[in-house]
Image: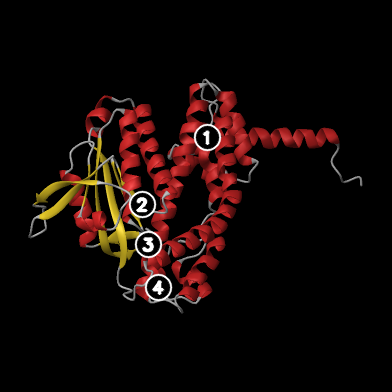
Amino acid sequence: MDDLPSADEQHADDQAAEQQQLAEWQAAGLYDPALPGADGRLALLQWIAAHGIDTQQMVAACAAHQLTSLVGDLHLRPRPTLTIDALAARTGLTVEALIDLRRATGFPPGDPNEPIAAESEVEMFRMFGVAGAFFSRDELLHFVRVMASSLRRIGEAASEMFLRDVEAPLQEVGRDELALARANLGGVQLVDSVTGVFEPMFRLLLQATTQQTRRARAGEVDYSTVPLTIGFVDLSGFTERSGSATPAELLEMVVGFESTALDLVTEHGGRLIKLIGDEVMFTTVTPTEGCAVALGLLRRAEQWGVPARGGLAHGPVVTSGGDVYGSTVNLASRIADIAVPGEVLADDAVTAATTEYRFQPAGRRQLKGFPHPVPLWSLEP
């Protein structure tokens, strides 16, 4: 018991360690007590150190202007410790297969001697190996590319949401590094619970997609194509409007257009394929549903004071990776290109398959990529 340090001795030791730490941070260029905001920087460094992060890591993050993100970044993904050879040994996959999977997810092979994977990622790669027993290499890699692309978009959306709703307001009230670092960690910690949403949502969406495909393929025996209505609608005054709009107004318009398109397509049992700037591409099982979506988008555009136009075609399409291809898709796109603002044009297949809408003859048009003039019809509002 006599060997235990007294309270005064412990306090002196703590003070000495604190002074040594301050000297280390000063020598590393992380802290200067003479600079404005020194107290805030010191509080930030102490908070980071309390999370078990050393000075070397702080210096590297500071050089990259990411000091306030350091704790959140390490919480998001632990430091990689496994080289590709070690990962192959742990998963039973070949190095070549791992390189293919990394490329499919958007990452280059990298230096074989550098760690590329964390312990928490071993099971993910092992599951890819299990899936390889059921699916061909090409189909599996294609699926991984689609999944990675979709998840990257989710990640970008989450990052944008944090920047606009959390970081920007903190910057406006004054740069408080510790508050920003805590907010960053809090945002990353949400990932721990948000990922729990993915599985039930994936199952729900997979069920919906399966049911839609079955409805579209009713009576079909050809597995190479699916009969669908393809629609394109674009905001024909978008370029002029965006040129004079503020960033906030432009963002509101784009998000509003995407939200409206998604709501309308969903309401009518279809699927939003993609949104490229001022143009939305969607599919529905029936032409009647496609007409309803196209007209709904035109009406919403009118409310914004931006004229829109659209094109519809119905026929067999090739589906791959969540996208659609083929002459029906090309036809719908070309039809939309020649429609005038406020108009939706459709092909014969659309008009022949719906009795709920009326059409006016729009003549035979020569469309790029099609050898013969195509008879078109103008959809009445």
Label 4 or label 3, whichever comes before in sequence order: 4
Percent of width and height locating residue 3? 87, 46
The answer to whether the residues at label 4 and label 2 have Cβ atoms under 8 Å apart is no
Q: As rendered, which of 149 and 177 lies closer to the eye? A: 149
Q: Is residue 282 above or below residue 37?
A: below
Label 4 or label 2, whichever comes before in sequence order: 4
**Badge 4 is on which residue?**
97
Judged by depth in the image, the label closer to the viewer, 1 or 3, is 3
Marks 1/2: CA–CA distance: 68 Å
* Identity of the residue drawn at 51% across and 73% down: 91
- Residue 52 is left or right of residue 62, and the answer is right
Q: Residues within 10 Å of mark 1 (few under 14, many from 20)?
A: few
**Badge 1 is on which residue?**
27
Judged by depth in the image, the label closer to the viewer, 4 or 2, is 2
Judged by depth in the image, the label closer to the viewer, 1 or 4, is 4
Marks 2/3: CA–CA distance: 31 Å
Q: As rendered, which of 364 and 337 lies closer to the eye? A: 364
Marks 4/3: CA–CA distance: 14 Å
> Can residue 282 be seen from the camera position used here?
no
**Badge 3 is on which residue?**
145
* Identity of the residue drawn at 37% across and 75% down: 137
- Residue 94 is left or right of residue 314, and the answer is right
